[in-house]
Image (cartoon, helix red, strand yellow):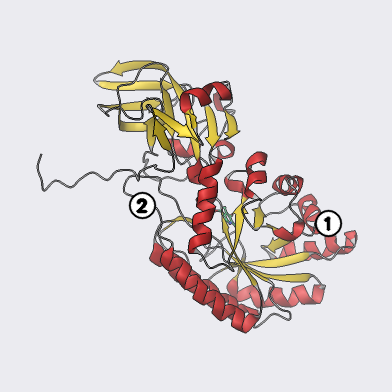
């Protein structure tokens, strides 16, 4: 081998899971056995112990005063939400149905915040009546909250979602800075704050969310400094104390070759200082970080079964009974510009040598239905179980499961 040749980047090791006797282990259960418990392939499985370890890691590295919220849209499976509320301090929801799930899990409105543009009247009513904090995203919405609040006779709890005048660099998905459908532009926030007090609404604080899926420590730290600075500046225009500051999330997980898990130390150390400074000036405001994929993304696998193997002009194809319709993001069609592979393994051949480079594709009549492109795997056979890692967030509910009318996958919390 040519030594000057650059080593091809590899996926980060998926060592949140163990292997035994060639089988991938999901919370102590070998995959071969789990398949029978599922009753079918394809299925999603989420491992409680991986979620618990992730929360433990955050609690270790982040300042103790930082509240952790779960952003439910990442994975709204009710059993999983029910498990997460034993681990985190609050839930962020993005629709009336998510609010219902949260309330059904026994979470109080005082621990829930509701963000998202275009909230509907019924959703706002549900939020007001359950005393959920509404992160207001426009002036029309603010007026509507006041009207509905009067109509119901319950004072609404509101925070302002701020569209900052800076953006989160190296973020997978930018959701702040420049023109946005999200939040109220920072320069208009003083006006919104005045309206909140003249409307007699219950002011909770500010919500500043800059973006998602960030693996760059420096840019996350820069965003945090910007968020605290902006919050301090905006709070000067408020007539009442700030009780909660939601600093967004944005912590990413490694999906693609070359990506590494985030080092949390320096993020946590800086946050401790920023929180100290902020609370010195603003009293005992609660500071919360909201996380979706960082909490649950790496706990999940998507498992499908090889049902055909063929060769076409020198390329070997393994065809599985699941694909894009069940897992849009792993197929590369959920916001990726250039398709890259998620980490994939043959879950019943974990300790076998990877000796062939193949295509793993689904059953849909579209060339977009790819789960693994030119991927090195052990020699495959019909009946083998293809595991797609990093599937605990934006998988099942973020996929067009009715496309082509194939059977649905099931979900399991293990
Ligand atoms: C989607 C979303 C999140 C969660 O983002 P992740 O990348 O899953 O952590 C957090 N806050 C808001 C407002 C969101 O819209």
In the picture, residue 380 is in which quadrant? top left
Name which of mark 1 and mark 2 comes first in the sequence. Answer: 1
Q: Depth check: give the residue in front, 384 or 370.
A: 384
* Vertical placement of residue 382 versus 374, above or below: above
The answer to whether 195 appears left or right of 9 in the picture is right
Q: CA distance from mark 1 to mark 2?
A: 43 Å
The answer to whether 2 appears left or right of 69 in the picture is left
Q: Residues within 10 Å of mark 1 (few under 14, many from 20)?
A: some
- Where does label 2 land, which residue? 260
> In the image, residue 143 lies at what x, y percent?
78, 65
Q: What secondary structure is marked by label 2?
A: loop
- Residue found at x 43% / y 61%: 264
The answer to whether 22 appears left or right of 58 in the picture is left
Quadrant where the N terminus lies? top left
Q: Which mark is residue 294?
A: none
The answer to whether mark 1 and mark 2 are in CB contact below 8 A is no
- Where does label 1 land, which residue? 129
Q: Is mark 2 within 8 Å of ligand 1?
A: no
* Vertical placement of residue 80 versus 172, above or below: above
Q: In front: mark 1 or mark 2?
A: 2
Q: What secondary structure is marked by label 1?
A: helix
* Vertical placement of residue 328 versus 313, above or below: below
Q: Residues within 10 Å of mark 2 (few under 14, many from 20)?
A: some
* Vertical placement of residue 116 versus 411, above or below: below
The answer to whether 3 appears left or right of 105 in the picture is left
In terms of image quarters, where does ligand 1 lie?
A: bottom right
């Amino acid at each position: 081998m040519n030594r000057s040749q650059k080593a091809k980047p590899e996926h980060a090791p998926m060592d949140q899971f163990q292997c035994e006797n060639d089988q991938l282990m999901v919370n102590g259960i070998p995959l071969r056995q789990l398949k029978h418990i599922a009753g079918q392939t394809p299925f999603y499985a989420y491992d409680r112990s991986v979620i618990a370890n992730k929360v433990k890691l955050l609690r270790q590295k982040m300042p103790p005063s930082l509240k952790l919220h779960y952003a439910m849209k990442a994975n709204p499976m009710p059993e999983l939400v029910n498990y997460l509320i034993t681990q985190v301090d609050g839930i962020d929801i993005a629709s009336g149905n998510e609010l219902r799930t949260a309330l059904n899990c026994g979470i109080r409105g005082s621990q829930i915040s509701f963000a998202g543009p275009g909230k509907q009247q019924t959703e706002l009513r549900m939020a007001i009546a359950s005393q959920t904090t509404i992160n207001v995203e426009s002036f029309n919405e603010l007026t509507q909250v006041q009207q509905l609040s009067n109509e119901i006779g319950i004072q609404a709890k509101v925070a302002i979602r701020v569209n900052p005048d800076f953006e989160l660099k190296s973020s997978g998905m930018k959701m702040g800075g420049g023109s946005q459908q999200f939040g109220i532009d920072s320069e208009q926030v003083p006006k919104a704050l005045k309206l909140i007090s003249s409307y007699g609404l219950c002011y909770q604080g500010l919500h500043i969310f800059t973006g998602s899926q960030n693996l760059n420590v420096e840019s996350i730290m820069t965003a945090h400094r910007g968020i605290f600075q902006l919050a301090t500046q905006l709070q000067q225009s408020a007539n009442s104390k700030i009780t909660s500051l939601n600093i967004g999330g944005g912590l990413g997980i490694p999906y693609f070759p070359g990506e590494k898990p985030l080092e949390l130390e320096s993020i946590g150390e800086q946050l401790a200082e920023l929180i100290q400074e902020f609370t010195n000036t603003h009293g005992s405001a609660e500071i919360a970080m909201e996380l979706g994929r960082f909490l649950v993304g790496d706990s999940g696998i998507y498992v499908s079964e090889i049902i055909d193997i063929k060769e076409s002009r020198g390329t070997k194809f393994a065809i599985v009974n699941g694909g894009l319709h069940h897992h849009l993001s792993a197929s590369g069609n959920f916001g990726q510009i250039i398709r890259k592979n998620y980490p994939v393994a043959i879950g019943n051949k974990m300790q076998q040598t990877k000796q062939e480079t193949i295509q793993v594709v689904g059953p849909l009549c579209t060339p977009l239905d790819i789960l693994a492109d030119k991927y090195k795997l052990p020699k495959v056979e019909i009946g083998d179980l293809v595991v797609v890692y990093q599937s605990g967030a934006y998988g099942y509910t973020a996929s067009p499961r009715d496309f082509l009318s194939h059977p649905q996958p099931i979900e399991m919390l293990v």
